[in-house]
Structure formats: C-alpha cells, structure tokens
Amino acid sequence: NDPRFDGYGPPGNIFQLGSQQFMRNLRAMFHEYREEEDNPSLTKRQRELQAKLEELTLNSEAIWERERSRGEIVAPWIIKIPYFVLCYFLDVVFEGKNAFSRFFLLETVARMPYFSYITMLHLYETLGFWRRSSDVKRIHFAEEWNEFHHLLIMESLGGDQPYWVRFLSQHSALAYYIGLCILWMLSPSLSYKFSEMLETHAVDTYGQFIDENEAKLKELPPSLAAIEYYTVGVSDPMFGEYQTASVSDPERGIRKSGTNLQSLYDVFVAIRNDEGDHVSTMKSCLDPKEPVLSPALESRALTGVALASSVGFLLGSVGDWTQLADFVDSASSGIDLDNVLTESATRSSPILDGIIGGIASFANGLKEMAGDGADLDVDEDAAGSFLEDVVGGGATDGIEMEAILEVAKKVVLSILEVIRF
C-alpha cells in the first residue's frame, strides 16, 4: 500500500468513529493533552501570534446596539423567542472568552439550515410534492460550502480547542438541524425567515468584531485556511454560486475577496460580506416575486456562446487553419472579460466581433452544407445525421486531423481564459 493514501477511502462505521470521538473528548476533559504553550514544536513567532489572538475582544452589548439600530425584527414570536434565547445564550456563555470559540459555534450551527433545506427539498421531490425549487439546492449547497470554509478558518485560529466548545457546538447543531426540518414541514417561509435573522445577527457580530479590533487585525497575517479558500479557491465556480445578489444587480458582479487578502482584517471583512450575501439569498427565497437564480446561469450562457463561436470559426475557416490558430493564440494570451463586455470595448473588441461572426458563420455553414438557399431547421435528429454526412461524405478529406485537434485544443484553452467563473 502507498503510504501517501493512508486515511483515504470511506469513513469507518458510526460506532467506531463515535467511540473514537468519545474517548478523545474524555481525555481532553481530564487534561491528558498537553497545553499548547508547553508544546515545544511551536516557534517563537507562532507563540507571539497566539498571544496577539488572545488580545482580541468582542463586546456583546455593542452587537445588540447594532441590531437595535436596524429597527424592530418583524417576525412571528414562534421564531423570535428561540432566536433571542439562542443569541442571549451565546452572550452569557462566551462573554469575555476567546472570540474564535464563539465564531466556531456560530459557523458550526450556521451550516445546518442549508443542510436541512437540501434535505427537505430532496424529500419533497422524492414524494412528488414540489420540484420548482430543485435548482435552489445547488445554491443552498454553495452556501453550506461557504460556511464550512468559515468553520475551517475558525479552527485554524484555535476556536475549536476547548472540548466543551466542541461538545456544545456539535450537539447544538444536531438539535438545530432537527428543529429546522420540523419547522420547514410546518412552514418553509418561517424556516427561511429564521435563517435570515440568524445570518443578520452574524453580520452584526462580525461587523462589531472588525470595528472593535481593526488595528490589531491588520497586524495579523491571514490563516492558511483563509488563503486556500479566498485566494487559491476563488476559481472554483461554487465560490460565487451563493452570491445571488449579483444576478439581481449585474453592476455588482461576483465578489472575489481573495484578490486583496493581506491581513486577518481582510479575512473577517470577507466573512462578514459572505454572511450579508446569505441574508440576501434568504430574502430572495422568501419573496415569491423574486426568482432565486444562480450566478452560474450567466457563466453557462457565456460558455454556450463561446462554444458556438468556436464551432463557427472551425466551419468558416477550414481552408486556412493557420489563420485560426493565430487568432486563438492571440485570444488565449489574456483577456479581461469585464473590459470586453463594457460598452466602450464592444465597439472595437475583436473578441465580440469574433463571437458574433462565429455564430453567423456557423449558421451559414450549416445552410451551405445543407444546400444553397435551403432553410435548415436543426433539431437533434437533423444535427446527428448532419454530422454523419460530414464524416461519411468525405467533407474532412485532405485535412490533417492532428492539426484540427491542435486547433481545437487551443480553442478550448481560449474559452477557459475568456469565461471567468
């Protein structure tokens, strides 16, 4: 066995993993693990950073001042009472303690709504009750994926170190999940409203933490987990999938915080903004007149246009493969899609001209191969027989297939460069 793959594969059964976790927490309760300040593997720099993290504060009363400034919470008491109980419980338990432990519990619990929504939507689909919201499952998963990485960031900052914090977080999350599933069955609108309230409280909590510790946070570097998600992982299409506000407000675009991630201050500003996006998505889910659309719809449309233009160029330029190769070489050298799509750029953009010309030549090529002057109605059967005629009728005779493949590869690379997810 290759030792590099140790630990991979399916997890153990629930009894094995449960007993392992129980014993781990039991040892922690009896202080069998060494304290980190006695850990000789920590460098001097790491100890200094730990000390600075311990200096960060969070004023619970100031959080409520922010919430009161938003005005009265408009919601039925059936969800307002549990909301106030949960928030005041956090204030009592974590007042004066490590702020990252509080954030760890918040992010552990914050993942549960989206898990419950996916569960209930899946159940409704299975039972044949409701399928109109099937696409929303993708958005809810992206929201859960985002909260999961928030959780990883809090773990990297030591928020999960006390055993009682882990115990409280895990059991609270399970209870929250079951409660939300029951609430969804009674009223999906109330379930979404409760999540909107909790996410709004998270925005105020992180906002207060940022303002209260701005100078100290700017002196601390971002954690590795934050860099991996916001900087390295920014190319993942799932990163912007939960930012549904970018669909209703095209000028805003998909926010990519990793382009300017220089300190822990930038990390928490990004997390606060993420929570704000979750609030916007929950409001969209509550509004029957506002469709909950994924930003990936726009990317899929652009991908389709780019593919159509590529096929058009291939059909329209089969006599001069060198010219096509030169074009895709220039296209793949680096394109800023934002500039290409602006009004000023469209007047002189060879890319947009190429897309429009490619689609036109694609349509003209189909008509020419079907016969001069023929009106071609392309459906699936016609398209399939057309391709068979092209290959079987010798339309590709005399063409170097290796050259075609090379050009096709360059076209694909240029598409990936143009379509910025």
Image (tube, rainbow, N blue to C red):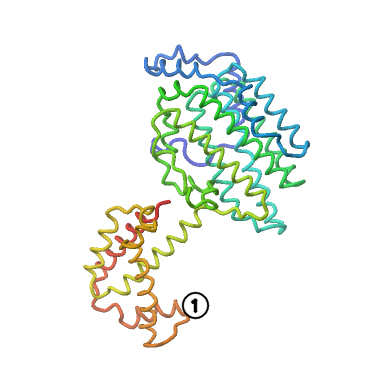
Q: Position of residue 244 (x, y in %)?
A: 55, 49
Q: Is residue 186 above or below residue 86?
A: below
Which residue shows up at 70% across the image and 40% down it? 180
Q: Is residue 346 left or right of residue 197?
A: left
Q: Answer few, some or many: residues within 10 Å of disc 1's Cα (few below 14, many 20 plus, some between 14 and 19).
A: few
| SS at circle 1 | loop
Q: Is residue 193 above or below residue 296?
A: above
Give amino acid for label 1: Asp
Q: Looking at this view, name the residue that lies furthest to the top.
A: 38
Foreground residue among 21 and 272: 272
Q: Is residue 318 left or right of residue 277?
A: left
Q: Is residue 79 above or below residue 100?
A: below
Q: Position of residue 306 (x, y in %)?
A: 39, 63
The residue tagged 1 is 379
Q: Position of residue 252 (x, y in %)?
A: 48, 47
Foreground residue among 26 and 83: 83
Which residue shows up at 29% across the image and 56% down it? 332
Residue 332 appears anywhere in the view: yes
Which residue shows up at 47% across the image and 59% down it? 300
